[in-house]
Amino acid sequence: MAKKVRKAIIPVAGFGTRFLPATKVQSKEMLPIVDKPVIEFLVEEAVASGITDILFITHPSRLNVIQHFSRDEGLERFLEKKGKLDLLKKIAHLHKQANFSFVHQEEPIGNGDAILRGREFVGDEPFAVFYADDVIVSKTEPALRQLIDVYDKYGVSVMGLMEIAIEQISKYSSIEGKEIESGVYEIKGVVEKPQSHEAPSNLTSIGRMVLDSKVFEYIQKQPKKNGEVYLSEAVGKLAVEGEVYGKKLEGIWHDCGSAFGFWRANLEIGLEHPEIKDQAKEFLKKFNEEN
């Protein structure tokens, strides 16, 4: 019987250069979608999927992720004194959602190196990986839970997949695989940023994975490319051995690694936000009429 997936690693040690100057003094993952930082969407998804322990791989100069998931008793007292109990409710639970741990990655030398720093945290258990560029909104089962269900059934590492327009595939990766049941694929290989006519499919891998702990052995053996160690190379080796499946995720994928994708996430999620959705819809209606 496969071991239970209860731990997750979230690398947040990058400098977020595509979002400068907004990320000059704060982590890209702390940029807000309406009133909630990107990283909070990931943590909520993890907890809703059954994760109890989360390790953040951080950079020593970026402490705001640590601060966000630590208790701020002074702020709590202030809000309580002012009678702002609705705001107090929004922050008082943040540090209680899971058991949070933090490890520094002093140099941004690849996501493979970042994940390797979680080896002691993981031990010999399977674990989830989140990339903070990807926010997935699902009105049914959380995206990570969908992957865990496949892991529980087959006992192998599982990648999150999404369909994209074939003309966009050169910006991402293309999955080569065999569908073994509806929406579940045995992964044969991953082609990075292929031209559309060379892509084996219009399925791309996104920032959700459930990995077997043996992946650490493969990461350790990976030589650096362009000064970095890539997790995808290690996962590719597992795929060659038939030990990686993919699950086409149900939900709306927001690629928050690009300026347009981040803006779109704010727009679409804002249109569902209980506090501003009516105003947002009225504004867009008026904007369309005037333009």
Image (cartoon, grey):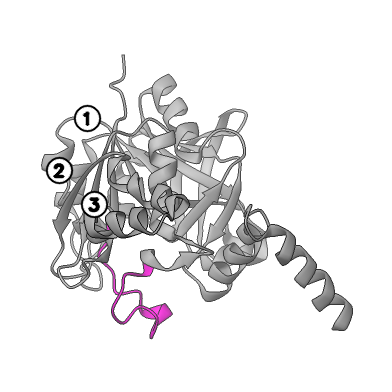
Residue 271, horizontal then vertical, whole percent: 68, 59
Mark 2 packing: few (<14 Cα in 10 Å), some, or many (20+)?
Answer: some
Numbered disc in front, either 2 or 3: 3
Q: Name the residue under label 1.
A: 125
Residue at screen point 88% across, 77% down: 289
Residue 160, horizontal then vertical, whole percent: 48, 43
Residue 211, horizontal then vertical, whole percent: 31, 38
Residue type at numbered disc 2: Arg
Note whether 259 is above or below 142 in the view shown: below
In this rendering, the count of numbered labels is 3
Q: What element carries label 1?
A: loop
Q: Residue 71 carries which label?
A: 3
Q: What element carries label 2?
A: helix
Residue at screen point 39% across, 59% down: 82
Is residue 74 visible in this depiction of the protein? yes
Residue type at numbered disc 3: Arg
Note whether 206 is above or below 125 in the view shown: below
Q: Mark 2 points at which residue?
A: 119
C-alpha span from label 2 to label 3: 27 Å
C-alpha span from label 3 to label 1: 29 Å
